[in-house]
C-alpha cells in the first residue's frame, strides 16, 4: 500500500499514528466527542437546576413549618 502512495512503509505508519492520535484527542476520558459531552452536560445541568428548585421549595416549606 505504501508503494502505491509513493512513500515508505515507515512514513505511512507515522501518518496513521498521527491520525489515530488526533482522533483520540477529540474524545474525552469517557470516549465522548465534544458535541456528545456538551449534550450530556446540558442535560445534567437542567436536571441539577430542577433538583435545586425542588430543594429550595422544600427548605422554604420546612422553614415555614417550624414557625
Image (spheres, rainbow, N blue to C red):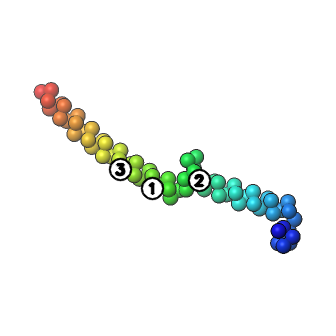
- The residue located at (35%, 47%) in the rendering is 47
**Which of the 4 quarters of the picture holds residue 23?**
bottom right
The mark that comes first in sequence, 3 or 2, is 2
The mark that comes first in sequence, 1 or 3, is 1
Task: Identify the residue position indicated by label 3 in the image.
Answer: 46
The single residue placed furthest to the left in the displayed view is 67
Task: Identify the residue position indicated by label 2 in the image.
Answer: 27
Residue 39 disc label: 1
- The residue located at (31%, 42%) in the rendering is 51
- CA gap between label 1 and label 3 equals 11 Å
**Residue 20 spot, x, y in % from top left:** 70, 57
Vertical relation: 7 (above or below) 34: below
Circle 1: is it few (<14), some (14-19), or many (20+) Cα within 10 Å? few
**Residue 14 spot, x, y in % from top left:** 79, 59
**Residue 58 spot, x, y in % from top left:** 22, 36
Circle 2: is it few (<14), some (14-19), or many (20+) Cα within 10 Å? some
As rendered, which of 55 and 31 lies closer to the eye? 31
Vertical relation: 66 (above or below) 28: above
**Callout 1: helix, strand or loop?**
helix
Is 52 positioned to the left or the right of 36 in the image? left
**Residue 25 spot, x, y in % from top left:** 63, 54
Circle 3: is it few (<14), some (14-19), or many (20+) Cα within 10 Å? few
- CA gap between label 3 and label 2 equals 23 Å
- CA gap between label 2 and label 1 equals 14 Å
Amino acid at each position: 500500500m505504501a508503494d502505491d502512495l509513493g512513500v515508505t512503509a515507515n512514513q505511512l505508519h507515522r501518518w496513521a499514528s498521527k491520525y489515530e492520535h488526533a482522533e483520540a484527542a477529540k474524545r474525552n476520558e469517557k470516549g465522548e466527542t465534544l458535541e456528545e459531552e456538551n449534550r450530556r452536560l446540558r442535560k445534567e445541568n437542567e436536571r441539577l437546576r430542577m433538583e435545586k428548585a425542588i430543594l429550595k421549595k422544600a427548605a422554604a416549606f420546612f422553614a415555614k413549618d417550624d414557625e
